[in-house]
Image (spheres, rainbow, N blue to C red):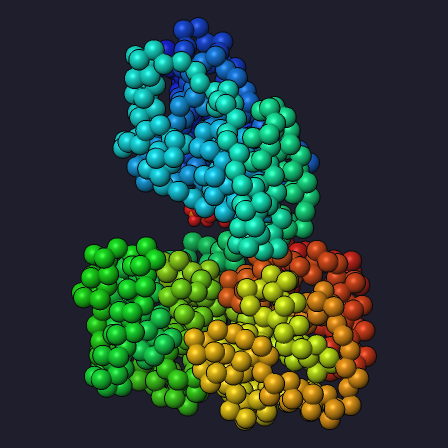
């Protein structure tokens, strides 16, 4: 009989079976917490019951606290109360871990006396990925069970481990196979048969201390800028230095502080945004077309990366190149990519053999595409060249095949228009290296059929990528905003900051690398080509810094030539700023009669981020991005915008749109064209709304 809907109770002899039924992931919503409290009361009152088996239905035991309750007024009972209630029981409690057991789910398990896991189970305390720490005893119980060093590793990185690794560490007692209910029942019977009794983790001796300073240095190095990981260390330290109850209180205090932080809000936004971006309401219930047989036209760096990604997902891939020699080179590139994937544990060696053998076909003629379901063109980024390829696709591909272009900025509408089947055409913009990077912009021209869009999203999911819908427009979402980022950086350099100041400021903001170090790595000729292409379209009022082009003209193309904005040694290690770059920057300052100023790092980062937000608002207003969250996902997944800031739009909401707009208006005094405030930003401020409001009700 059900006690309360998501928690069920039944009895088998002396054992109470308590199951959690809260799809999709058995999150610990209030009704589940209440249900668990009721179930414990009932089991204790149920005459003859001596043990409780706690298990989950569906794919997982418990995926953690209900993230959608975060930031809402607390609803009783709290999760720590539930955990303490379970642990305090005189009944022997066994939990059965299957699928994933994460966060609060693992904290529930740690409050039971015995833990048995199914083969394939994964466990973890991923709270730091949400800007939090475990808040229901995880930082106090786990170190008592596995020691401080292992607890620091698991909690401060938030990584998941397998059931067998958890067994080796002592988190679970036994790993086996079968159905959760049966396993729990037989394990509990076995324990009772062996007269095992309760054994609360909180009663274990406090763990041994460690070198906290060294541990903190490591965390700060790995999780630069983030508050939660180092706070987790403080809470874990309390497990060594304080009695259990006080340690719990200390953990809760930290947890509640973090719950109020901007980083928690940003990371929870990132979690839901990523899922909402690829879950378009208009595609609900729409079946995608088949895409088992994929083809990639062009086996260069990008094409080989795309082919590798599809092969890693177990799909069959035909790569079409211009000659047999070029096809062989493409195969070598793919083999290299896949070898790397095997080394990183992303595929097994037998999957590698299959991918490179049976699943990969190399061809040097378009006829090889005749039976392919999804064809992705990844040839040279030139509209004329791509048009020729699309004509061939139109001739050779079977009716209903999805025809995609991997352009990063060209007009997909125009490519669709030259075929007789524009309804089958879309853009699939991958990011380099395509078999590693997680972002995929799905670019949708006017005529594209809805099931073709659905195919783009389903394909991305199969490849394990975060897909975001983008409209047609130069640079789509990401490269367009990147353009504003780069222009704002160049502008502040002309105004007095050095490229090193800018790079340090952006690293301080949370990017892994600053824009000038990135430009050196990519090659300065890449940016130059983009500027050349856009030159004809450029508004005469746009002021563009000239030093980047001058540097290219002087032959300083970045790492590959030994110097760009920085100098590089023979091993390509970055050294000081390149004097030639400084000379050109100074010359430009003199020419433009700029009074060079000093900019604090905070100001540099704010200004550059403001430029991204302003451009993002334009991109949304034009419909190229549907919602602010789409921009946020693109910039986090593809361009290194720090996740703990939630993407440019979330960052702007958290900093306040009114203040941001007024800063932009100040910058506009010097360059009214570049800093022209986006109309959408002005409207939002005037209406007292923010970007998040548009996530709920997108512009129509
Ligand atoms: N709370 C609320 N909703 C959740 C959730 C959670 N903990 N976990 C997943 N969901 C929702 C998702 O938003 C999604 O909803 P949608 O269908 O409406 O978009 C749905 O469940 C399915 O999720 P996924 O699309 O992510 O499904 P997958 O099968 O790919 O992945 C998962 C499942 C591995 C459980 C993944 O969702 C995940 O990692 N979830 C987060 C786990 C987590 O961070 N737990 C810790 C929470 S913090 C905590 O416990 C605090 C405690 O210490 C007090």
Q: Residue furthest top?
A: 47
Residue 249 placement, left or right of 321: right
Residue 459: x %, y % from top left: 37, 62
Residue 272: x %, y % from top left: 55, 51
215 and 475: which is toward the camera: 215
In this view, 118 is above or below 157: above
For the point 61% across and 71% down, the residue is: 503
For the point 79% across and 62% down, the residue is: 658
394 and 240: which is toward the camera: 240
Q: Residue furthest left?
A: 358
For the point 29% across and 56% down, the residue is: 347
Which image quadrant for residue 603? bottom right
Residue 413: x %, y % from top left: 48, 80
In this view, 200 is above or below 280: above
Asked if residue 87 can be seen in this view, the reply is: no
Residue 117 placement, left or right of 262: left
In this view, 134 is above or below 515: above
Which image quadrant for residue 483? bottom right
Residue 620 placement, left or right of 5: right
Residue 135: x %, y % from top left: 58, 35
For the point 43% across and 44% down, the residue is: 160
The quarter of the rendered structure image containing the N terminus is top left
Asked if residue 212 can be seen in this view, the reply is: yes
């Amino acid at each position: 009989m059900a006690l309360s809907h998501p928690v069920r109770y039944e009895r088998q002899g002396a054992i109470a079976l308590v199951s959690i039924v809260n799809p999709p992931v058995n999150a610990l919503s209030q009704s589940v917490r209440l249900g668990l409290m009721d179930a414990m009361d009932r089991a204790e009152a149920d005459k003859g019951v001596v043990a409780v088996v706690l298990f989950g239905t569906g794919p997982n035991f418990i995926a953690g606290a209900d993230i959608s309750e975060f930031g809402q007024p607390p609803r009783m009972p709290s999760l720590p109360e539930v955990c303490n209630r379970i642990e305090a029981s005189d009944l022997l409690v066994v939990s059965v871990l299957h699928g994933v057991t994460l966060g609060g789910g693992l904290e529930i398990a740690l409050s039971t006396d015995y833990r048995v896991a199914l083969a394939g189970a994964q466990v973890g305390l991923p709270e730091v990925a949400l800007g939090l720490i475990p808040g229901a005893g995880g930082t106090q119980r786990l170190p008592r069970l596995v020691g401080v060093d292992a607890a620091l590793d698991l909690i401060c990185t938030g990584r998941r481990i397998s059931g067998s690794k958890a067994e080796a560490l002592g988190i679970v007692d036994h790993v086996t196979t079968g159905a959760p209910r049966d396993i729990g029942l037989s394990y509990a019977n076995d324990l009772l048969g062996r007269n095992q009794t309760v054994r609360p983790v909180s009663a274990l001796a406090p763990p041994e201390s460690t070198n906290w300073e060294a541990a903190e240095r490591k965390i700060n190095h790995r999780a630069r800028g983030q508050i939660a990981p180092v706070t987790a260390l403080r809470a874990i330290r309390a497990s060594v230095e304080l009695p259990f109850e006080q340690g719990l209180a200390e953990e809760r205090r930290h947890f509640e502080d973090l719950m109020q932080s901007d980083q928690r809000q940003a990371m929870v936004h990132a979690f839901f945004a990523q899922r909402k971006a690829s879950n378009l309401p208009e595609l609900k219930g729409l079946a995608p077309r088949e895409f088992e047989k994929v083809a990639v036209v062009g086996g260069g760096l990008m094409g080989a990366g795309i082919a590798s990604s599809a092969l890693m997902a177990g799909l069959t891939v035909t790569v079409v190149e211009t000659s047999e020699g070029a096809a062989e080179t493409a195969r070598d590139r793919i083999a290299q990519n896949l070898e790397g994937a095997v080394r990183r544990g992303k595929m097994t060696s037998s999957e590698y053999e299959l991918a490179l053998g049976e699943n990969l076909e190399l061809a040097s003629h378009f006829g090889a595409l005749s039976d392919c379901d999804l064809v992705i063109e990844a040839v040279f980024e030139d509209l004329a060249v791509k048009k020729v390829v699309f004509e061939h696709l139109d001739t050779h591909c079977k009716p209903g095949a999805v025809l995609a272009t991997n352009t990063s900025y060209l007009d997909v509408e125009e490519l669709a228009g030259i075929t007789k089947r524009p309804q089958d055409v879309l853009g699939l913009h991958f990011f380099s290296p395509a078999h590693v990077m997680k972002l995929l912009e799905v670019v949708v021209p006017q005529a594209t059929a809805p099931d073709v869009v659905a195919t783009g999203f389903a394909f991305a999911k199969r490849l394990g990528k975060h897909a975001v819908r983008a409209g047609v427009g130069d640079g789509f979402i990401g490269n367009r905003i990147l353009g504003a980022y780069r222009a704002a950086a160049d502008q502040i350099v002309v105004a007095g900051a050095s490229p090193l100041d800018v790079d340090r400021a952006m690293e301080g903001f949370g990017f892994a690398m600053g824009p000038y170090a990135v430009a050196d790595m990519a090659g300065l000729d890449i940016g130059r080509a983009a500027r050349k292409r856009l030159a004809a379209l450029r508004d005469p009022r746009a002021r563009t810094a000239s030093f980047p082009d001058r540097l290219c003209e002087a032959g300083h193309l970045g790492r590959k030539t030994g110097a760009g904005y920085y100098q590089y040694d023979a091993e390509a290690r970055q050294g000081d700023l390149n004097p030639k770059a400084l000379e050109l920057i100074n010359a430009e300052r003199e020419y433009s009669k700029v009074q060079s100023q000093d900019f604090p790092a905070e100001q540099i980062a704010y200004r550059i981020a403001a430029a991204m937000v302003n451009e993002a608002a334009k991109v949304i207003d034009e419909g190229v991005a549907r919602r602010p969250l789409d921009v946020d996902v693109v910039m986090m997944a593809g361009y290194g915008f720090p996740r703990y800031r939630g993407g440019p739009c979330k960052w702007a909401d958290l900093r306040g749109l009114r203040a941001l707009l007024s800063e932009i208006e100040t910058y506009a005094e010097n360059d009214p064209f570049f800093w022209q405030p986006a109309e959408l930003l002005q409207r939002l401020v005037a209406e007292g709304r923010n970007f998040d409001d548009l996530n709920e009700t997108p512009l129509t």
